[in-house]
Protein backbone atom coordinates (compact mmCIF):
# COMPACT_ATOMS: atom_id res chain seq x y z
CA UNK A 1 0.00 0.00 0.00
CA UNK A 2 3.00 2.26 0.03
CA UNK A 3 2.35 3.07 -3.63
CA UNK A 4 -1.09 4.55 -2.99
CA UNK A 5 -0.57 8.29 -2.59
CA UNK A 6 -3.55 10.38 -1.57
CA UNK A 7 -3.91 13.83 -3.16
CA UNK A 8 -0.32 13.64 -4.34
CA UNK A 9 1.29 17.01 -5.04
CA UNK A 10 -1.43 18.93 -3.22
CA UNK A 11 -1.64 21.65 -2.18
CA UNK A 12 0.00 23.11 -5.24
CA UNK A 13 0.52 26.72 -6.35
CA UNK A 14 -3.03 26.97 -7.72
CA UNK A 15 -4.49 25.62 -4.48
CA UNK A 16 -2.58 28.22 -2.46
CA UNK A 17 -3.71 31.03 -4.78
CA UNK A 18 -7.34 29.90 -4.48
CA UNK A 19 -7.04 29.70 -0.68
CA UNK A 20 -5.55 33.18 -0.50
CA UNK A 21 -8.31 34.63 -2.67
CA UNK A 22 -10.94 32.83 -0.59
CA UNK A 23 -9.53 34.41 2.57
CA UNK A 24 -9.60 37.86 0.96
CA UNK A 25 -13.20 37.34 -0.20
CA UNK A 26 -14.24 36.24 3.30
CA UNK A 27 -12.62 39.28 4.86
CA UNK A 28 -14.36 41.60 2.39
CA UNK A 29 -17.71 39.97 3.18
CA UNK A 30 -17.11 40.28 6.94
CA UNK A 31 -16.05 43.92 6.65
CA UNK A 32 -19.26 44.72 4.77
CA UNK A 33 -21.16 43.09 7.65
CA UNK A 34 -23.53 41.45 5.22
CA UNK A 35 -26.09 38.97 6.40
CA UNK A 36 -25.57 35.54 4.95
CA UNK A 37 -28.24 34.49 2.53
CA UNK A 38 -29.64 30.98 2.39
CA UNK A 39 -27.53 28.50 0.50
CA UNK A 40 -27.69 24.87 -0.55
CA UNK A 41 -25.07 22.25 0.28
CA UNK A 42 -24.85 19.26 -2.01
CA UNK A 43 -25.19 15.86 -0.41
CA UNK A 44 -27.66 13.53 1.18
CA UNK A 45 -29.92 14.94 3.86
CA UNK A 46 -30.00 13.89 6.59
CA UNK A 47 -26.23 13.58 6.54
CA UNK A 48 -24.90 10.27 7.78
CA UNK A 49 -23.81 9.93 11.37
CA UNK A 50 -20.05 9.86 11.81
CA UNK A 51 -18.95 8.15 14.98
CA UNK A 52 -15.84 8.86 16.99
CA UNK A 53 -12.52 8.57 15.20
CA UNK A 54 -10.33 5.55 15.73
CA UNK A 55 -6.90 6.60 17.01
CA UNK A 56 -4.29 6.05 14.30
CA UNK A 57 -1.12 7.73 13.16
CA UNK A 58 1.59 7.50 10.51
CA UNK A 59 4.58 5.34 11.41
CA UNK A 60 8.24 5.26 10.42
CA UNK A 61 9.71 2.55 8.22
CA UNK A 62 13.24 1.18 8.42
CA UNK A 63 14.33 4.02 6.12
CA UNK A 64 13.87 6.61 8.88
CA UNK A 65 17.12 8.20 9.98
CA UNK A 66 15.47 10.44 12.62
CA UNK A 67 16.21 13.73 10.85
CA UNK A 68 13.35 15.42 12.73
CA UNK A 69 11.62 17.02 9.71
CA UNK A 70 8.35 15.32 10.74
CA UNK A 71 8.66 16.76 14.24
CA UNK A 72 8.93 20.28 12.86
CA UNK A 73 5.83 20.08 10.63
CA UNK A 74 3.44 18.31 13.00
CA UNK A 75 0.73 20.88 13.85
CA UNK A 76 -0.28 19.12 17.09
CA UNK A 77 3.24 18.34 18.34
CA UNK A 78 2.36 14.63 18.38
CA UNK A 79 5.81 13.57 17.14
CA UNK A 80 8.96 13.54 19.25
CA UNK A 81 12.43 12.03 19.34
CA UNK A 82 12.72 9.34 22.02
CA UNK A 83 15.67 8.99 24.38
CA UNK A 84 16.78 6.07 22.17
CA UNK A 85 16.92 8.40 19.14
CA UNK A 86 13.80 7.02 17.44
CA UNK A 87 10.83 8.98 16.12
CA UNK A 88 7.70 8.33 18.18
CA UNK A 89 4.14 9.53 17.60
CA UNK A 90 1.63 10.11 20.39
CA UNK A 91 -1.37 8.54 18.70
CA UNK A 92 -3.98 10.43 20.74
CA UNK A 93 -2.58 13.79 19.57
CA UNK A 94 -2.39 12.86 15.87
CA UNK A 95 -5.10 14.45 13.69
CA UNK A 96 -4.16 12.31 10.66
CA UNK A 97 -3.21 15.30 8.52
CA UNK A 98 -0.19 13.43 7.11
CA UNK A 99 1.98 16.55 6.98
CA UNK A 100 4.78 14.36 8.36
CA UNK A 101 4.32 11.85 5.54
CA UNK A 102 4.51 14.56 2.87
CA UNK A 103 7.50 16.27 4.48
CA UNK A 104 9.70 13.23 5.10
CA UNK A 105 12.74 13.68 2.83
CA UNK A 106 13.41 9.94 2.82
CA UNK A 107 9.84 8.74 2.24
CA UNK A 108 10.11 6.86 5.52
CA UNK A 109 6.79 7.97 7.07
CA UNK A 110 3.71 6.02 5.98
CA UNK A 111 0.07 5.99 6.98
CA UNK A 112 -1.46 2.68 6.07
CA UNK A 113 -5.05 2.04 7.13
CA UNK A 114 -7.88 -0.12 5.82
CA UNK A 115 -9.15 3.07 4.13
CA UNK A 116 -5.96 3.71 2.15
CA UNK A 117 -7.08 1.98 -1.10
CA UNK A 118 -10.47 3.75 -1.03
CA UNK A 119 -8.90 7.16 -0.40
CA UNK A 120 -6.30 6.56 -3.10
CA UNK A 121 -9.04 5.80 -5.61
CA UNK A 122 -11.42 8.62 -4.62
CA UNK A 123 -8.76 11.30 -4.25
CA UNK A 124 -6.70 10.55 -7.36
CA UNK A 125 -8.56 12.95 -9.67
CA UNK A 126 -8.03 16.67 -9.19
CA UNK A 127 -11.12 18.49 -7.98
CA UNK A 128 -11.47 22.20 -7.55
CA UNK A 129 -12.88 23.71 -4.36
CA UNK A 130 -16.51 24.83 -4.32
CA UNK A 131 -17.83 27.86 -2.47
CA UNK A 132 -21.36 27.74 -1.07
CA UNK A 133 -21.90 31.27 0.24
Image (cartoon, helix red, strand yellow):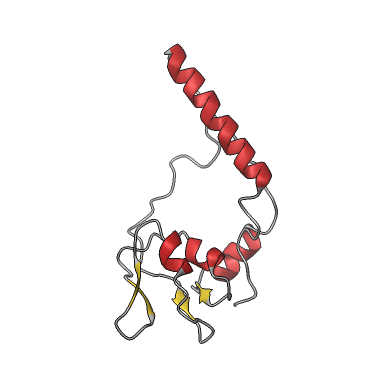
Quarter where residue 117 is shown: bottom right
Q: In the figure, 19 relative to 104: above or below?
A: above
Q: Position of residue 35 (x, y in %)?
A: 43, 14
Residue at image x 50%, y 83%?
61
Q: In the figure, 133 relative to 85: above or below?
A: above
Count all numbered tags in the image, as a single digit.
0
Quarter where residue 93 is shown: bottom left
Q: Nearer the viewer, residue 85 or 22?
A: 85
Q: Position of residue 73 (x, y in %)?
A: 45, 60
Residue at image x 56%, y 31%?
22
Q: Position of residue 48 (x, y in %)?
A: 43, 49
Asked if residue 96 shows in the view, the reply is no
Q: Nearer the viewer, residue 45 or 32?
A: 32
Q: Position of residue 17 (x, y in %)?
A: 63, 38
Quadrant that contains the N terminus: bottom right
Asked if residue 9 shows in the view, the reply is yes
Q: In the figure, 99 relative to 59: above or below?
A: above
Residue at image x 41%, y 61%?
74
Amino acid sequence: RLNMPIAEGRPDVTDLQIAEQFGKDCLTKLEKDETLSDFYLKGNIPYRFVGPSTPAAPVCTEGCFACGECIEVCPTHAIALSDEGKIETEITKCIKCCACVKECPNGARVFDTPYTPMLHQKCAARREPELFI
